[in-house]
Image (spheres, grey):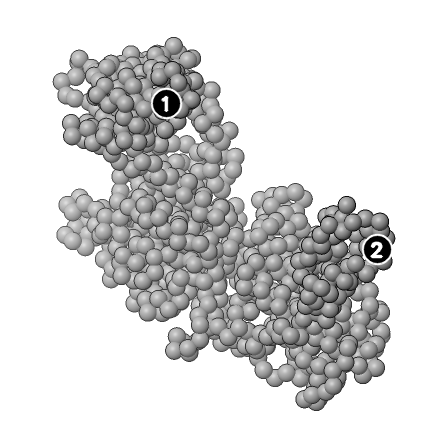
Amino acid sequence: MSASKTTTGTAPAASAEASPSAHEPRYTPSEIEPRWSERWAAQPGLYGVEPPSSGKKKYYVLEMLPYPSGQLHMGHVRNYAIGDALARYMWMQGHNVLHPMGWDAFGLPAENAALKNNTPPREWTVQNIAAMKRQMDRLGLAYDWRNEITTCLPEYYRWNQWFFIRMFERGLAYRKKSKVNWCPECQTVLANEQVINGYCWRHEETLVEQRDLEQWFLRITDYAQELLDDLDRLDGWPEKVRTMQRNWIGRSEGAIVEFGLEDPQRAEDKKIPVFTTRIDTIYGATSIQLAPEHPLVKEFAASNPQLAVEVAALLNEQKRARESGDVAVIDKHGVFTGHCAVNPFNKERLPIWVANYVLLDYGTGAIMSVPAHDERDYEFAMKYGLEIRVVILPRRTSDNTTGEDEEPILPYTAEDSLLINSDPFNTLGNKEAQKVMAAFAEQHGFGKATVTYRLKDWGISRQRYWGTPIPMLYCEKDGIVPVPDAQLPVLLPENVEITQTGGSPLGRLPEFVNTTCPKCGGPARRETDTMDTFVDSSWYFYRYTSAHYDRAPFDSAVANYWFPIDQYIGGVEHAILHLIYSRFWTKVMRDLGLIKNDEPVARLFTQGMVIRNGAKMSKSKGNVVSPDDMIARYGADATRAYALFAAPPDRDLDWQEDGVAGVSRFLGRVFRFVTRHADRTRSAPGSAQNTATSQALQRKLHQTICKITEDFGGRWHFNTCIAAIMELVNALTAAEPAIAAGEVPDAVLAAILRDLVLLLAPFAPYLACELWEQIGEKENLLRAPWPKFDEALAREDEIEVPVQINGKLRTVIRVPAGADEDTLRAAALADEKIKAAIAGKEIVKVIIVPGKLVNILVK
């Protein structure tokens, strides 16, 4: 069976093997796997790392840590099986491997479970961790649990608090009253990245509200440009992830221009800052449009009840557009406020409108409307009869022989243009005009060139209980004061009544709230918000390198040896939330002098989802498959090998239990074949005469070694790796009569079986260890060297070459491998099918691609 036919999850049929005889050992994973699991558990250092002084090349492979929900499903198994196969392969390649696991243990689900089951979040979480850890061990995942971390334990979250204080000292952590995203279902604040098309990222049917609250923020925008620039260095990341991050950071070059507010009743000046990427079109501005939530709109509406009603209607339209997921395609509506602004360039009065397509969180929440040169502005102006003034024209082309400027089709938005109606900037090209006009604005004090980002500062305050307490105090005398390092961690109290009303549960605990100011010694009040749980996962992979270090978040010398992570594996759904935060955190830690690397991850792999019944496998959709059930029926090796075999790891896997059964049958075939011949291999002599059969088997073996080695080094098409092992086993099974007849020397057979077990080890470690012992090997399989590919042994004696006539395939010929052009030409022309096809025709040319193709051109 060819590898190309093995992507559907169906194992090749055992055509060459008769049904197992009654006296043959049976493949019983339920006996084999628990026995090896116990043996591995008795060796706590089995998966441990070696010191940097070992001289070995390091390899840090990591799967994203899970939330301890209490049960793994096959989506988890797929993720972990990929990482585990890679870790085992790297150990066998002689690397010093770090392959840890831990628990993202704070968060909303634990609180919800506490409300539902009347179980304290810590108790619920610890129980779930124990259950999932048992599942991972039963799957045979090669984790060194001595490096385990649990983010809800004080020894971990103490360092969240330490980092927060360092950021506060540097001005990176600050508190302000701000309009925030509020999820009515979570009863807490969400970061911008946690709002998906206007909905909560956890509750996909809950529309997020806007509220004004005092919140703590981390100034991620200070690193916006570096986060953007360094994406170009991450060539080991999927381009789709880098594109998602570029779009989220959203760099825009332009200018801030302050339009004056014309109001004769005001004694003081009032400015309306507008960000524009096209200052070259500012003479074409015919109105100013504000977002419905703009502070100035609220001020206007306060004295105009009718305007207030109309603005509320616009805001509702905008919210409905958020529900549909795209405000850009909203049916554009607006209302005139009765006020005007003044264009600082030409002193023209511009009516101020409120428009439903202008967003408060984009730019400044105000735009200058240039209908002739912006599609949205044009649509709005046509609807409301606003002036449309052309101020840029296409550059004159050689086809324009009249010498007259051509009137463009509106809206005309091209950047390769010239200014008109913009005295004194007429005739400037638009790019030059943007620079000159921004400089003019700055010179006259009403604007300047600037860069803006879609990325906003990270709001980390959460009005929930189960999270890291924010280590800040409020003193009437000294204001905001950080908790001294010596008093960390600020412990999260236990036995707290959890409700989803009345703000943070910690605020109802006087013994937690009331404390003493470390500066003045007077009374102080603790912050009662907890941190966004994405803080926990922003740096956890550094803690793995020294999980029990108590003098700092981690031992910097050890972290600098292991970082960056060589291979990180997880879902693409974390492309924005987790990955951009972890990149930010790494850069902050670098600036604190804790690490030397600029980026946490050298290579990122985003695996496909596991699909069942047409939807992503998840508890919320009720379509999960428990690995426990699969292990009970088919064994852990078959369960994890199927997760790798059923589809390429970067594509979605359509779950089929029959596929697990098929892989289990294949593993049974391997088990029986090796056990049938184990006695002959244990005492195999050092050398023997090769035969045609043994040469053919060696050729197939080394072709398989080559393929799997190449796949581990690049494509990761583990589905075709396992398929190649299946083909090798098919060839071995088909050769059993020849083996029984002595046509395969014992030494050759021993070498083939040894390499077969080594090739199987990353994918089915239980069975591989069992067979390794059966063939008499004493070496630790995990550290046994990966088999080496021998090109000479892999080379085919003969190859098949297609022969075409005028580009159409007519036959396939077999020729010696490495045949030259003369040999290929002679063999093709001597073929009976070719002779008949070209009889009576003139051969014009024979095109030969050695080893690939013969094409005979005739007429």
Tell me residue 659's x, y (percent): 72, 56
For the C terminus, the image quarter is top right
State the image quarter where residue 357 is shown. Answer: top left
Residue at 77 percent across and 77 percent down: it is: 692
Q: As rendered, which of 411 and 344 lies closer to the eye?
A: 411
Residue at 75 percent across and 78 percent down: it is: 694
On screen, residue 844 versus residue 473, left or right, reads right
For the N terminus, the image quarter is bottom right
Tell me residue 480's x, y (percent): 21, 46
Of the residues shown, which amino acid type is indicated by label 1? Arg
Secondary structure of the residue carrying tag 2 is: helix
Q: How far apart are the alpha carbons under marks 2 and 1?
A: 65 Å
Secondary structure of the residue carrying tag 1 is: loop
The residue that mark 2 highlights is 835
Residue at 34 percent across and 44 percent down: it is: 458
Of the residues shown, which amino acid type is indicated by label 2? Lys
Q: Residue furthest top?
A: 385
Label 2 close to label 1 by CB (< 8 Å) = no
Q: Nearer the viewer, mark 2 or mark 1?
A: 2
Q: As rendered, which of 84 and 752 lies closer to the eye?
A: 752
State the image quarter where residue 334 is shown. Answer: top left
Q: Residues within 10 Å of mark 1 (few under 14, many from 20)?
A: some
For residue 396, the mark is: 1
State the image quarter where residue 833 is shown. Answer: bottom right
* 115 is higher (above) or lower (below) than 441: below
Residue at 43 percent across and 25 percent down: it is: 318
Tell me residue 6's x, y (percent): 70, 57
N-terminal of the pair, mark 2 or mark 1, is 1
Specify whether residue 310 is in view.
Answer: no
* 447 is higher (above) or lower (below) than 770: above
On screen, residue 621 versus residue 372, left or right, reads right
Q: As rendered, which of 255 and 273 lies closer to the eye?
A: 255
